[in-house]
Image (cartoon, coloured by chain):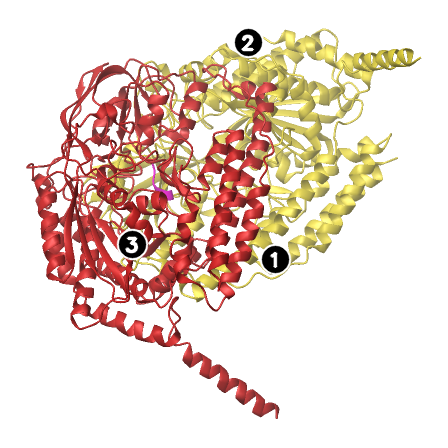
Chain colours: A red, B yellow
Amino acid sequence: MMRGYLAILLSLSLLSAQQSTAPAIAGFTPDGAKTQLDLESRYEAALNRQNLQQWMKRMAAKPHHVGSPGSKEVAEFMAAQFKSWGYETTIETYYPLFPTPKTRLLEMIAPEKYVAKIEEPAVEGDETSGIKAGNLPLYNAYSTDGDVTGDLVYVNYGLPADYERLKQMGIDVKGKIVLARYGGSWRGIKPKVAAENGAIGCLIYSDPRDDGYGAGDVYPKGAYRPQFSAQRGSVMDMPVYPGDPLTPGKGATDAKRPADPKQASTVTKIPVMPISYGDAEPMLRALGGPVAPVEWRGGLPLTYHVGPGSTKVHLKLEFDWKLAPAYNVIAKMKGSEKPDQWIIRGNHHDGWNFGAHDPLSGMVSVMEEARAIGELAKTGWKPKRTLVFAGWDGEEPALLGSTEWAEHHADELRRHAVAYINSDGTGRGFVGMSGSAALEVFAAQTARDVTDPQTRVSAMERANARRRASGRPAEYRIDPLGSGSDYTVFQHHLGIPSLNIGFGGEGGGGVYHSNYDSYDHFVRFIDPDFQYVMATAKLGGRMMLRMANADTLPFRFDAMSRSVRGWTSEVIKLADDMREQTKKENELIRSGALKLAADPTRPFIAPEPKAEVPFLNFAPLLNAVSRLEAATAKVSAAKNVDDAALLRAEQHLTQADGLPRRPWFKHVLHAPGFYTGYGVKTLPGVREAIEQRQWQEAEQQIARLAESLNGYTRVLEQAIR
Amino acid sequence: MMRGYLAILLSLSLLSAQQSTAPAIAGFTPDGAKTQLDLESRYEAALNRQNLQQWMKRMAAKPHHVGSPGSKEVAEFMAAQFKSWGYETTIETYYPLFPTPKTRLLEMIAPEKYVAKIEEPAVEGDETSGIKAGNLPLYNAYSTDGDVTGDLVYVNYGLPADYERLKQMGIDVKGKIVLARYGGSWRGIKPKVAAENGAIGCLIYSDPRDDGYGAGDVYPKGAYRPQFSAQRGSVMDMPVYPGDPLTPGKGATDAKRPADPKQASTVTKIPVMPISYGDAEPMLRALGGPVAPVEWRGGLPLTYHVGPGSTKVHLKLEFDWKLAPAYNVIAKMKGSEKPDQWIIRGNHHDGWNFGAHDPLSGMVSVMEEARAIGELAKTGWKPKRTLVFAGWDGEEPALLGSTEWAEHHADELRRHAVAYINSDGTGRGFVGMSGSAALEVFAAQTARDVTDPQTRVSAMERANARRRASGRPAEYRIDPLGSGSDYTVFQHHLGIPSLNIGFGGEGGGGVYHSNYDSYDHFVRFIDPDFQYVMATAKLGGRMMLRMANADTLPFRFDAMSRSVRGWTSEVIKLADDMREQTKKENELIRSGALKLAADPTRPFIAPEPKAEVPFLNFAPLLNAVSRLEAATAKVSAAKNVDDAALLRAEQHLTQADGLPRRPWFKHVLHAPGFYTGYGVKTLPGVREAIEQRQWQEAEQQIARLAESLNGYTRVLEQAIR
């Protein structure tokens, strides 16, 4: 009897093992999942690696930043391709403000003369590095015009804490020009904080410890940044709002408006320019004043001083402020069953000059996805929902193309957009996927079904192995989105569940936003045989096909309540830790211990004691989180959930008037940091109020956040039939 | 009534406040403490800063390493001084083996030729830096002779973990020459571990990140190591035993023995030489092979590779192996009441050439202490116990003078020595005092009574302020001694409670063991007006006077049981953490996750799984600690304790046959680390057995340690009358 019973058990478990060989896919029945996986296999078989390589080579052959003839050519080439694959394709053009340099002068005038090169020389073996025509020189977009002369001060990363440190050393940057190194935050934070502290100009250089020979052999011997390369990039105050600085919240459709930077609150207050470590070295070497704190020192062969000493610098910048046409390529394939539900896939096509890795590696992946899906469609298959493929222009200066398009189409998007799936540069290594917690299961299941080209295990398994090897939890946990690519308007402004996907982490590379981000560099160092661009296409295409074909929307909410619970605990701990820390620091200041511990031969100004940190009323938030947890558990257990109700659920996590001092950012769960830039701040209204010691605002934000969470919870509750 | 009561309370508290204005001193009655503090004030008043400056200038005027004419002159000068101050003074000479270089050749022979300079050039403004006569060139003492040619491999700090990492990268150093950077351990560990791994030669260079321009402006502009300076120093295997390699445990009194390095087990197995970063740079630049791991990279302006590539190096070293006379200056002042109880104060007088900071700043302090005490003695005052002042020779090569003297006088010292108080180089900043836990209260009370010259608060208060400012507990907690100066034989071999005292932490300095450790450097950067040498003299002299005059011995044992309890918890946690860690790592290896997380385009050899960590029987140790705690609590509470019984108490913490594989080190509570060198290992028998995964030995060592602790506890118990 026992034997027979065991045998039955055994056969049952074998049966279930067989059944489970077709892995589950959220939104599909077991049978539907099988059919879907067959479709996806056909999709993968249709992908062609040669296209990726040929398109990248073609599109990276000349500078193609927004407003350039190269960008127009690229957009027209892409549009023609999408059309040929069967998509309804348009080029939607917007006209944001976009400055290009007219005058760039940087010279050290004391203690000796040095005129900065601010040019990236041609490099042997890199075909495009010598192209001058149409080449955008080294500059930071949306720096204000300026002609300033002043003492130079080295400010480390140029973050608020660095200026605190300078104050303790008795150094004031008022009326001076600051030299900051790249890193520690998004670059646009540096001139913003410098101006807040009274500086009149800002230089940002790439220190070779992190971004040069200290990271690896420099180009062309290796993949890393050579001596006279620097990092272009936007310094617009994008944590306030991205996109055209003249039309926040609206599409910049009018090409004839005045292009007046004075009307643009997100343009920097002081002139700012990126420089190479080759140009920074003579200035750093000339700096006097105290030796920089240990953590401030970089990889140049000199003793880092803070300044000012006798080092005087002259910086002159003039820009051509124009409205530039941004060409967004929009290609649609109408859904057969639910044409009003749109799945959007995007990547930008503009580059800082050649932009092979950033953005073309991702862009050609999106194109090949569209092409292969177009082939499937030619065999009679149709997606149930509508597919939208987008190639954005002007991402580099300020997410211009995507922001203007999404602002312009905001109402439609709020009604129709199911999800936005973004990519940008992609390369060899490990799959990375960030985004809305509602998409965690969806992302994990898709990456599970893509094979890592080097190891032949699942891409998800390999990424999880890396997580485990570095001591983190083995399981994939989705990280929320900050900013830095085109998902920003979708996720943070409109509340459309978004993902950002790609591969990377191997092969290295240090030519970010330089002339050397070229086809030649890419095929030597980033992804020589386009295996990982191919893997990105497999991942992105499978996502599109699943999202388009699912019987029910593949949103899963357990990760959402788990995340919100975790972030809530974090902000409570943040306040508690600040309370303890403030108490300790005040005691050290008031007792004089801080002063006694300092070297009396060096200037030291002890900071003022800070106001004690009060206890905050987190109860509304904690109650809201408990209710959310109960609701998500119910949704998970429910047999039948109303898809239509869920479609717009995440929009309930946005607030019409947005975050304090930056109404464009409307999502209550995450935003780029006001003082970190790209880096995400979760529960940003509450968290940043605490960080900035705005206790009243913190209490208000807790209440508002709780309200939004309750609204979202109600939608989930009502979706259960 | 209430008012009156309060008034009484108030007057009582005023009274007790007045009484407490004479601070307590361990070993003295309240009245005795007053008298003692008066004496100490007179002592401080007798100190003369000019002596410090003049003696340093004189003694640092020429090279004075062991065996040199300079050393003899210094010893004779000191002896004459001590005599003139009223001390019975002798020069006790020993004859340890001491090699000096005959041939030093280092050249890179491929991929291109570079002959290393291995010379420190004269420097402007440094009078002695040009002196060639008698100058000891750059070399590591007790390197073996050798003439080797081989591929070069960069091994980071050259510690066991670094070779593990190299193995994972597929790199073997067998038959190769390794290039290690200074840091991470005492230098002598590097050639030892290199030889264990099969290397045939070892170069050690000073990387400019920590020891050069990365630390501060280089000499003569600033205090730090210039391009062609390197760090001399011993590489003898001193964690096995220090002193004459031919006479472990015995005084090297015979000048006529054969000087055969082959009989010396502590001489290195492979030739080793220190080089400057100027000399290291061309070799590091030439290295091929993989890029070094991030943590391995230093401050040179190049990409650090591991090698080997095609870089070949030729190293030829020949030494003149001789018995060198080591002149110890021993000055005694007999005690009036307890002449058989000796308080010993020492500092070495030999330097790597000029040695102004190391050791003369400490040596002149000891001299001035003796002189001022001699003056007090001329007024009729006499110490109750015998004072011994020692100037050791040959500390730099291997603690030669102190070790041979103490080995030679071991029986007397075991009978008579109450405590040994050591100093070495001293400078501007914070008081530092390490040593036997029995002396924690004594040390803290003495430093409490010395004024910090810059801030005019107590030296103890200032050091405690620094501790608090860096987030550590506010109260002074004595750290145990490792090795690196002349206390070693007293504390670790003989079990005599020892202290190592000095000031430092400000002013910086990067001329350690170089030609630039000169008078000129010292007065510019280390302690310009000898304020802190003076403070050292105040501290050391007060310690001598207190220890000499105390009614009862000032040992206090609460810190001892607290320390042992803390170390016991540490070793238990060490085993527990290793168990968890081993389990995790084995799982990562066996599951293949480690391999999956690695970049397949680079060599990666996953380590073998390790044996699981068993649970060890810590019960005997835990029981012994509880008994010790009970006993120290009783001693603290006791009215009357037998001094004679306590005099030799700490010797019960030594074991006749010492630690495994190094019987010379006899103390069970601490020793320099077998694989770290100077750095202390507490409960070394147990801790190192666990670290080396010798589980059986760990259990044996736990039992032995418990026995010793029980023996010590019995002495304390019996001392209570």
**Residue A457: % across, % down:** 33, 67
Q: Which callout, 3 or 2, points to the residue nearer the camera?
A: 3
Residue A329 seen from this side = yes
Q: In which quarter of the image is the C terminus of chain B?
A: top right
Write the start and end of the magenta stretch as one range: B294-298
Graded by Cα atoms within 10 Å as few (under 14), some (14 to 19) or many (20 or more), the crowding at tag 3 reads: many
Question: Looking at the rendering, which quadrant does residue A593 occupy?
Answer: top right
Judged from the image, the secondary structure of the residue bearing numbered disc 2 is helix
Residue displayed at 25% across by 41% down: A399
Q: How crowded is mark 1: few (under 14 residues within 10 Å), some or many (20 or more)?
A: some
Distance, label 2 to label 1, CA atoms, is: 53 Å
- The residue that disc 1 covers is B697
In screen coordinates, is B218 left or right of B398? left
Instruction: Give me the C-alpha separation between circle 1 and circle 3.
Output: 52 Å
Q: Mark 2 lies on which chain?
A: B
The residue sitting at 77% across, 27% down in the picture is: B553
Locate residue B469, reporting x and y percent: 56, 26
Alpha carbon distance from label 3 to label 2: 69 Å
Structural crowding at the residue carrying mark 2, measured as other residues with C-alpha within 10 Å and reported as few (<14), some (14–19) or many (≥20): some
> From the viewer's perspective, is B629 left or right of B272?
right
Give the mark, 2 or 1, whose residue is nearer the N terminus. Answer: 2
> Image quadrant for the N terminus of chain B?
top right
Question: In the image, is residue B32 above or below residue B142?
Answer: above
Label 3: chain letter: A
Q: Where residue A314 sits in the image (x, y, percent)?
A: 21, 17
- Which mark, by number, is residue B49? 2
According to the picture, the residue beneath numbered tag 3 turns out to be A502
